Amino acid sequence: MTLSESPDALSAVKWGLIPSWAKDASIGSQLINARGETIAEKPAFRAAFKRRRCVVYASGFYEWRKDDPTGKVKTPLYIRLKSAEAFAMAGLWEVWKSPEGALRRTCTIVTTEPNELLSSVHNRMPVILPAEARAIWLDAEAPLDAVGSLVRSYPAADMRFHEVSRRVNTPRNEDATLVEPVVGAA
C-alpha cells in the first residue's frame, strides 16, 4: 500500500493504523478502517485526522455478499468505478516507534455509509475522493469542517461490482485473475 503525504509524494506503508501512543503493534490489525463519522473524536484517529491525512490509490476493492441468512455462505465481489479508472480513498497515517526504536509507518482507510449500490452488499464503504476533493483532504491547513464534509458516499451510478473467484479468499493467491468476473455469474 502506498501513502501520499502530498499530491506528488508516494511511500510504502503497512495497512492497519498503529497510533503513536500504542504500547505494541497488535492494535494495527483492529484499525484497518476508520469510521468517518467519528474520526475527529476517537483517540486512535483524531490526531491523524487533524494532521496526517493521506490518499490510498486502488483500481477496486473486495467485499463479501452474504448469500444466506446465517451469513455462512459469502460471495466475493470486486467493486470498482464504472469507468474502470483508478481512484483515491481517504486515509489516515501514523508513524509508530517500537520499543526497540524501529519506526513503522501505518495507515487506515476511512469508511462511511454505503451508497445505494453497495448497501445490498455491506453496511460500510470506503470514502472515495473525487479528483477535486483530494487537494482539500491532503491540505494539513484546511479547515476540519471542510475536510469532514468530504466524508460521504461515492455516487452509486458511477460504480459497478461483479462476482469473482473464491480464490480471493486465500492470501497466497495473488494474480490478475482475482478481479476477473466469474463466468456464468448473475
Image (cartoon, rainbow, N blue to C red):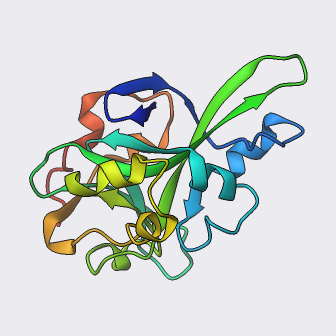
The quadrant holding residue 23 is top right
The quadrant holding residue 81 is bottom left
- All told, the count of numbered labels is 0
On screen, residue 156 versus residue 173, left or right, reads left
Q: Position of residue 154 (x, y in %)?
A: 28, 68
Q: Is residue 162 above or below residue 115?
A: above
Q: Position of residue 94 (x, y in %)?
A: 64, 38
Q: Is residue 185 above or below residue 165?
A: below
| Residue 27 or residue 135, whichever sits in front | 135
Q: Is residue 160 above or below residue 57?
A: below
Q: Quadrant of the C terminus?
A: bottom left
Q: Position of residue 134 (x, y in %)?
A: 31, 50
Q: Residue at x 62, y 35 (%)?
A: 106
The quadrant holding residue 13 is top right
Q: Position of residue 91 (x, y in %)?
A: 48, 49
Q: Residue furthest left?
A: 83
| Residue 167 or residue 30, whichever sits in front | 30
For residue 32, say whether it is visible. no
Q: Residue at x 13, y 48 (%)?
A: 84
On screen, residue 94 versus residue 124, left or right, reads right
Q: Residue at x 44, y 63 (%)?
A: 147
| Residue 45 or residue 169, whichever sits in front | 45
For residue 159, say whether it is visible. yes
